[in-house]
Amino acid sequence: MKILLFHAIKDEEEAIRHWSEQHKIEVDTTPDILSIDTVEQVKGYDGICIQQPVRIENPDVYQKLKEFGIRQIATRTAGFDMIDLNEAEKNGLIVTNVPAYSPYAVAELAVAQAMQLVRHVPQFSKRITHHDFRWEGLISREIRTLTVGIIGTGRIGATAAQLFKGLGARIIGFDYYPNSQLSGLLDYRPTLEDVLKEADIVSLHTPLLDSTAHMINHNTLKLMKKDAVLINIARGGLVNTDDLIEALENHEIAGAALDTFEDESFINQDLSGKGVNPRLQKLIDLDQVVLTPHVGFYTTTAIKNIVEGGLNSVVDVLSTGTSENQVHSLHAAK
C-alpha cells in the first residue's frame, strides 16, 4: 500500500515517519495542494490524504482520481467544505475527516483571542508602537462578569464553553442539535438571534454548511451589543467579511478575532513586501481586530493526532471500504 500526503508541512514530518514505520506502509509527501495542476502526482498510489486551504472546485480532479484507481479522499481536518461531496460521491470517492484531533487546541485559541479583545491588547499594542503609553478610553471588563455565547456545541464548542466557564463566565449557547449532556455547562437559547442579543462574547464553532454559510451578516451583526466581540476559529465562510468590516468601522460591535477567512489563499505563505486582497488589508488595519493565519489546530498534540487520524482513515477505507470518520453528501444540505 502506498499513500500520497498532500500539503505536507515540516511539523508533520516526524509524525508521518513514525506512522509509516509503525504500520509498514509507504507514505510519500508533497508540499502541493490537490488541484487539477497536481492531481497527476496521484498516479501509482493507492490512497491520498489532503489538507486544503482552498476548495477543490474542478470536477475533473474527482474524475482523474477515479481514473487513477483512487477510492477515497482523507482530509486531515475536522471541516470538509473544501471537498465537493457531490462530485466525490459521483466518482465513488469516500471522504473522511478527523473530527476530534484536539478540541483543546482550537478552544484555547478562542479563549486567548477573546481575552485579548476584552483587555484591548490590540489597541494598546498599536499605541505602544507609536510610543503612546496612555490608558485613556481602554478600560477593560473581567471575563467573570461577561456572558459568552457559544454557537455550535460539538466537541470544540463544548470545550470552549468549559474553558470560559472556568474563568467564571456565564455560558449560553445555540446549536441546531442541542446536547442534553451539556445542561450543567451552558444554557441553550432557542435561536441564534437570541444568543447574539444577549452575549458579550460570541464564539463560533459550527461547520460550514448551506445552513450556516454567512450566518454572521449585516442583519445578525445588528443584533449584537455595541460592546460585544466576535470570535471565529471555525470556518471563514460563516461570516460575511464585508458586513463584518462595515460593522467594525461603524463601531456597531467592539471587536473581532478571526483565525479563519472566506479566502484562505494566503494561509501559511510569506507575502512580505507583497500586497494582499483589500478585504484582508482592511481587517489588518483595524486596531480592534485580532488576526491569526488559521492556526487553531497548530499544536504538537493536534498535529500528531491529525496525521494519525488522516492516515488511519485511508487504511480503513482501503482495507474495509468504510471508516468511522466517513462524511456524507447529506451533511451539505443540513
Image (cartoon, grey):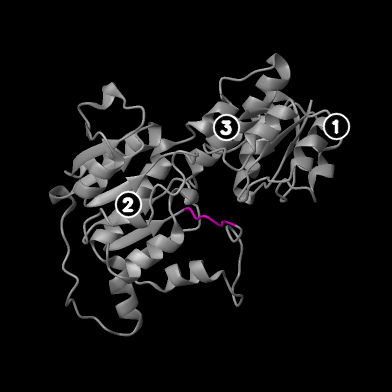
231 on left or right of 166: right
For residue 93, say whether it is visible.
no
Q: Earlier in the sequence, mark 2 or mark 3?
A: 3
Residue range corresponding to the magenta coloring: 260-264
Reply above or below: 276 against 105: below
Q: Which mark is residue 67?
A: 1
- By secondary structure, the bulk of the magenta-drawn segment is best described as loop
The mark closer to the camera, 2 or 1, is 2
Under mark 2, the amino acid is Thr
Secondary structure at numbered mark 3: loop
What is the x, y in percent for residue 291? 43, 61
Secondary structure at numbered mark 1: helix
What is the x, y in percent for residue 236? 48, 51
For residue 23, say whether it is visible.
yes
Residue that numbered label 3 is attached to: 97
Q: Residue at x 17, y 63 (%)?
A: 140
Q: Say which quadrant the N terminus sits in.
A: top right
Q: Residue at x 39, y 32 (%)?
A: 155
297 on left or right of 267: left
Under mark 3, the amino acid is Asn
What is the x, y in percent for residue 314? 68, 27
Q: Earlier in the sequence, mark 1 or mark 3?
A: 1
Q: Residue at x 72, y 28 (%)?
A: 90
The residue nearer to you, when weighing 34 against 216, is 216
The mark closer to the camera, 2 or 3, is 2
The Cα–Cα distance between marks 2 and 3, rounded to whole angstroms, is: 30 Å
Reply above or below: 94 against 129: above
The Cα–Cα distance between marks 1 and 3, rounded to whole angstroms, is: 23 Å
Residue that numbered label 2 is attached to: 220
The residue nearer to you, when weighing 319 against 307, is 319
What is the x, y in percent for residue 56? 68, 45
